[in-house]
């Protein structure tokens, strides 16, 4: 289920990314999927949305044991994430929600 969730969210991020580029010429997010947690025995995958200009990151975690929930955190690319994450149901993750997160988080100064 995690792979399906990541694929679905990735498609939404792609839509949000296109809209961000139209409206914010200085924001060019970079999206990646990371399976390193799984290699360390944690049954989860991560997706990062990074802004190179600000060094900010949106971190999304997809846990195998919570297939309908996405944990997320606004953090920095060069710092370890905090221990506490917010949660949102998978059905609440929309292209507009991701756009809003990117616009809010990446357009304001550090």
Image: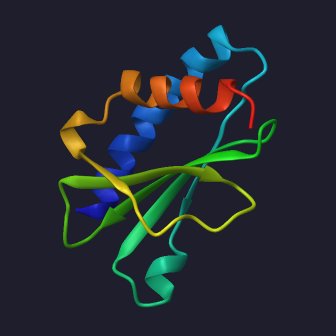
Percent position of residue 72, x then y: 41, 52
Q: In this picture, is 39 found above or below 34?
A: below
Residue at (54, 77) in percent of width and height: 36
Q: In this picture, is 50 found above or below 85?
A: above
Residue at (23, 45) in percent of width and height: 90
- Location of residue 64 (image quadrant): bottom left
Q: How is the image coloured?
A: rainbow
Q: Viewed as shown, does residue 3 lie left or right of 26?
A: left
Q: Viewed as shown, does residue 90 lie left or right of 16?
A: left
Q: In this picture, is 87 found above or below 15?
A: below
Outermost residue, top side: 23
Numbered disc total? 0
Q: Viewed as shown, does residue 105 lie left or right of 107?
A: left
Q: Quadrant of the C terminus?
A: top right
Residue at (77, 38) in percent of width and height: 54
Residue at (72, 29) in percent of width and height: 28
Is 19 or 27 nearer to us in this picture?
A: 27
Percent position of residue 25, x then y: 76, 15
Is 105 or 5 nearer to us in this picture?
A: 105
Percent position of residue 56, x then y: 68, 44
Percent position of residue 53, x then y: 81, 36
Q: Quadrant of the N terminus?
A: bottom left
Is 60 or 10 nearer to us in this picture?
A: 60
């Amino acid at each position: 289920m995690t792979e399906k969730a990541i694929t679905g969210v990735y498609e939404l991020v792609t839509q949000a990314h296109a809209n961000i580029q139209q409206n914010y010429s200085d924001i060019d997010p970079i999206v990646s999927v990371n399976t390193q947690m799984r290699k360390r025995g944690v049954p989860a995958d991560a997706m990062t949305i990074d802004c190179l200009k600000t060094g900010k990151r949106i971190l999304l975690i997809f846990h195998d044991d919570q297939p309908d929930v996405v944990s997320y955190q606004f953090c920095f690319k060069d710092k370890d994430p905090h221990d506490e994450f917010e949660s949102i149901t998978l059905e609440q993750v929309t292209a507009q929600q991701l756009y809003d997160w990117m616009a809010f988080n990446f357009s304001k100064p550090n």
